[in-house]
Image: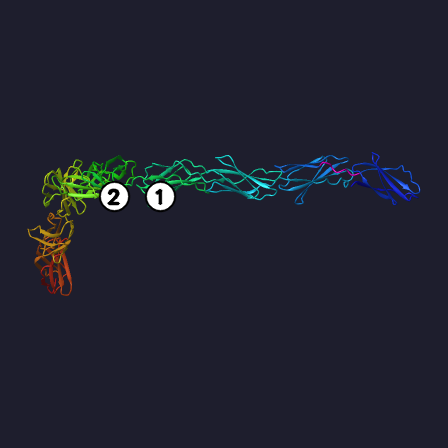
């Protein structure tokens, strides 16, 4: 259908109709007639410039000089064509250029109704990112520059099919038994068929074709790891290959399977060469009793654990890729090393420090090796085909681990259970002793002995088999107590463990000379005159001296040293109870002290002696301060006039001496008596008794005076003066004093009777009055 143009004009008076004429540059005309002021010229050519004139028609046609030029819409592009790029799904759509065209609009319409447009001034458009597996219809139109709605209209459509979409969810599964693998995928848009290609690690290429969603690869070899690609195709394009999952064919069975000689009693090892397609290997060992052991390994070697010693096993290996297992390899025989000997025992002979190892012989033939091991000494070995071995001359004090192994000619067994044995303990060395002389206790020391749990120390008298003292300890020193005095003893130390003793050699014995014995039959006597104590005792043998000690009750100590069996102590304190002991000296030691002997020294002198005289009775009270050690006292008054004496005895500190003579002077002494001696008697003071009573009193009266002359015989004793007394019946008392034996009393009353007496006055006492002389005065005095 051609283009058309609508022509309008202004009305002309008198015109009955009008005719519009369009002429192109080739002279071709097109016209339309109308009785109105417009008409439409059709069948115009596209893309042509026309000049339009309008002629008014009545009876005549007008002549018009006016014209209007217009241009018809461009022609549709010619030769539209589309080129697809299968791998990128880019489509190039092109066409031929048209006249009077300002730009082109290309349109792509897919099978889902989606539209894509491309505006260009060129004669082609690139459509990118086109959807895979779609049918696209492409058209193009030309646009005139002046009018947006003036276009050529669409060209006839060009249809293009894009490449199929890439396959998705590609899975590959190998058949573990028949050498095939199935690849599967999801149906994709635009695909008409599929091609599956697989490349392995042993063979280059496998493929298959399918119009469905799966395909089978056949003729696959074992141990292949297949890289699988899938290509979707239509009649125009294939897709790029899509890599799927790796397909693993069944692994090849392991080859060159062999047993590895490890000589283990509890394990055995298989080895083989690498098997194609294997991820890891499973080894199987079967015992004749049906027990099955398995071993998994990623290497080409595997060790079966927990096997029984001295047994054979049938073994094979298979390879697996975790989806398929290969067929079993060839079978081989595994052998474990012989079993360790059982019933191992060890017996030791402490006397010669020897051990005997024995065991049960459960396997015939072969050889047994017994080993005695200690970390501090070389191992001892003994090989035999029997069941006992002797190990003489063991080192003392060591712990030996005894074990036995069996060798069958190829392999040795594991060592048997270890039996531990301790050899006899070593003899003690460097034995020394130190004696405590005061109690005859000896401390014995020595160097620790290897292997010793304890020690026993024994002291022997020369030539004796029975020890006189012993002690036990876990350390390296021990005290021998209660050793006999005055002996030379051999001291030995013997070590023990749980069942053995050392030999306790005499070559290393220590010598102890014990402290001397204490003296016996100690006696002590005191010479009361010299105050010297004499001590004696029985002598001891092999002594260097004696020490005598006297310890007083007040703490005073005195001693003497001698080599004799007697000794005098001269400086005893008075009044003490002395404990006297004797010790024997022998070199650096002293004996125990002898049994103490008690000796009382002479009592001390009494002090503070005083005498108080009872003048009336001529009794003297003697008092004193007792001297230490005095048990009793004797107070004695010796007359200075004659040899008579008066005394009293007491155990207190005072005593009354009675019946003293008047008019005498007495010397007073107090003697103290101790346990064995008395104090020396010594006059300490004098006492004068009261003068004797005057005698032969005579009174002479003078009749011419009131005086009486009194005379008497002098009194014995110390008289200072006399007192004459005249006592009248009327109560009158008259006296006179005189230092002689006469005295005058004056003032007598006449006619009175007087009792006249005389008393003697001493320094401290007045004597009893004399006999009364009665006298009567006359009636008258001149």
Look at the image and say whether residue 77 sits in the magenta stretch.
yes
Residue at screen point 58% across, 44% down: 187
Mark 1, other Cα within 10 Å: few <14 / some 14–19 / many ≥20: some
The label number, if any, that marks residue 531 in the structure image: none
Q: Quadrant of the N terminus?
A: top right
Q: Which residues are drawn in magenta?
A: 72-79
Mark 2, other Cα within 10 Å: few <14 / some 14–19 / many ≥20: few
Q: Considering only order in the chain, which callout, 2 or 1, is on the residue closer to the N terminus?
A: 1
| Disc 1: which residue | 286
Secondary structure state at the residue bearing disc 1: strand
Q: Quadrant of residue 506?
A: top left
Q: Which secondary structure is most common in the magenta stretch?
A: loop
Residue 334 in sight: yes
Residue sticking out furthest to the left = 643
Look at the image and say whether residue 293 sits in the magenta stretch.
no
Q: Please give left or right for residue 68 compared with residue 309 in the image.
A: right
Q: Quadrant of residue 326?
A: top left
Report the number of discs: 2
Q: Position of residue 601 (x, y in %)?
A: 13, 46
Instruction: State how far apart marks 1 and 2 are (Cα).
Output: 29 Å
Q: Please give left or right for residue 262 compared with residue 110 in the image.
A: left
Q: Position of residue 457 (x, y in %)?
A: 19, 41
């Amino acid at each position: 259908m051609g283009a058309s143009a609508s022509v309008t004009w202004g009305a002309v008076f008198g015109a009955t109709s009008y005719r519009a004429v369009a002429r192109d540059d080739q002279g071709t005309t097109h016209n339309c007639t109308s009785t109105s002021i417009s008409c439409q010229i059709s069948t115009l050519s596209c893309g042509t410039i026309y000049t339009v004139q309008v002629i008014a028609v009545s009876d005549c046609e007008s002549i018009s000089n006016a014209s209007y030029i217009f241009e018809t819409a461009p022609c549709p592009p010619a030769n539209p064509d589309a080129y697809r790029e299968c791998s990128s799904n880019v489509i190039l759509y092109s066409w031929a250029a048209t006249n009077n065209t300002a730009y082109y609009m290309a349109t792509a319409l897919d099978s889902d109704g989606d539209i894509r447009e491309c505006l260009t001034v060129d004669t082609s458009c690139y459509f990118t990112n086109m959807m895979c597996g779609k049918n696209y219809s492409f058209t193009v139109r030309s646009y005139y520059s002046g009018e947006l709605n003036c276009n050529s209209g669409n060209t006839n459509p060009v249809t293009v099919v894009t490449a199929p979409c890439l396959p998705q969810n590609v899975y590959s599964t190998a058949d573990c038994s028949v050498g095939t693998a199935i690849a599967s995928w999801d149906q994709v848009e635009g695909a008409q068929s599929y091609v599956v290609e697989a490349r392995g690690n042993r063979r280059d290429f496998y493929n298959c074709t399918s119009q469905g969603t799966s395909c089978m690869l056949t003729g696959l070899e074992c141990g292949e790891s297949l890289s699988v690609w899938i290509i979707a195709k239509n009649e125009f394009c294939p897709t790029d290959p899509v890599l799927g999952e790796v397909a693993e064919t069944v692994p090849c069975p392991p080859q060159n399977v062999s047993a590895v000689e490890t000589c283990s009693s509890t394990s055995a090892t298989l080895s083989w060469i690498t098997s194609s397609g294997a991820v890891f290997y499973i080894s199987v060992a079967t015992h004749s009793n049906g027990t099955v052991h398995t071993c998994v390994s990623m290497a080409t070697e595997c060790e079966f654990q927990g096997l029984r010693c001295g047994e054979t096993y049938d073994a094979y290996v298979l390879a697996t890729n975790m989806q398929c297992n290969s067929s079993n390899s060839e079978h081989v025989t595994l052998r474990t090393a012989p079993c360790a000997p059982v019933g191992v025992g060890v017996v030791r002979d402490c006397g010669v420090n020897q051990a005997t190892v024995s065991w049960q012989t459960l396997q015939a033939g072969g050889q047994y090796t017994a080993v005695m091991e200690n970390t501090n000494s070389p191992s001892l070995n003994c090989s035999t085909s029997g069941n006992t071995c002797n190990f003489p001359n063991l080192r003392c004090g060591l712990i030996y681990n005894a074990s036995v192994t069996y060798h069958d000619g190829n392999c040795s067994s594991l060592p048997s259970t270890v039996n531990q044995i301790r050899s006899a303990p070593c003899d003690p060395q460097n034995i020394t002793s130190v004696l405590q002389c005061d109690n005859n206790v000896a401390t014995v020391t020595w160097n620790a002995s290897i292997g010793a749990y304890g020690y026993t120390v024994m002291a022997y008298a020369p030539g004796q088999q029975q020890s006189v003292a012993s002690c036990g300890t876990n350390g390296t020193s021990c005290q021998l107590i209660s050793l006999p005095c005055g002996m030379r003893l051999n001291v030995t130390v013997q070590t023990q463990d749980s069942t053995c003793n050392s030999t306790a050699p005499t070559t290393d014995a220590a010598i102890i000379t014990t402290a001397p014995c204490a003296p016996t039959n100690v006696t002590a006597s005191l010479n009361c005159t010299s105050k010297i104590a004499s001590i004696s005792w029985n002598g001891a043998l092999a002594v260097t001296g004696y020490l005598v000690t006297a310890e007083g009750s007040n703490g005073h100590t005195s001693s003497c040293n001698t080599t004799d069996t007697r000794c005098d102590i001269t400086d005893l304190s008075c009044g003490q109870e002395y404990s006297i002991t004797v010790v024997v000296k022998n070199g650096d030691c002293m004996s125990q002290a002898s049994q103490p002997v008690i000796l009382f020294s002479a009592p001390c002198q009494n002090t503070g002696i005083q005498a108080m005289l009872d003048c009336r009775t001529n009794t003297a009270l003697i008092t004193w301060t007792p001297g230490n050690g005095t048990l009793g006292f004797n107070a004695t008054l010796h007359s200075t006039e004659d040899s008579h004496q008066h005394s009293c005895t007491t155990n207190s500190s005072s005593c009354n001496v009675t019946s003293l003579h008047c008019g005498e002077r007495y010397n007073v002494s107090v003697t103290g008596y101790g346990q064995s001696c008395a104090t020396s008697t010594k006059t300490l003071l004098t006492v004068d008794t009261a003068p004797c009573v005057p005698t032969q009193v005579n009174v002479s009266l003078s009749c011419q005076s009131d005086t009486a002359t009194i005379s008497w015989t002098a009194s014995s004793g110390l008289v200072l003066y006399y007192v004459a007394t005249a006592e009248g019946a009327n109560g009158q008392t008259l006296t006179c004093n005189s230092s002689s034996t006469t005295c005058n009393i004056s003032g007598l009353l006449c006619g009175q009777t007087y009792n006249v007496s005389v008393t003697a006055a001493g320094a401290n006492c007045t004597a009893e009055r004399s006999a009364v002389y009665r006298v009567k005065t006359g009636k008258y005095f001149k």
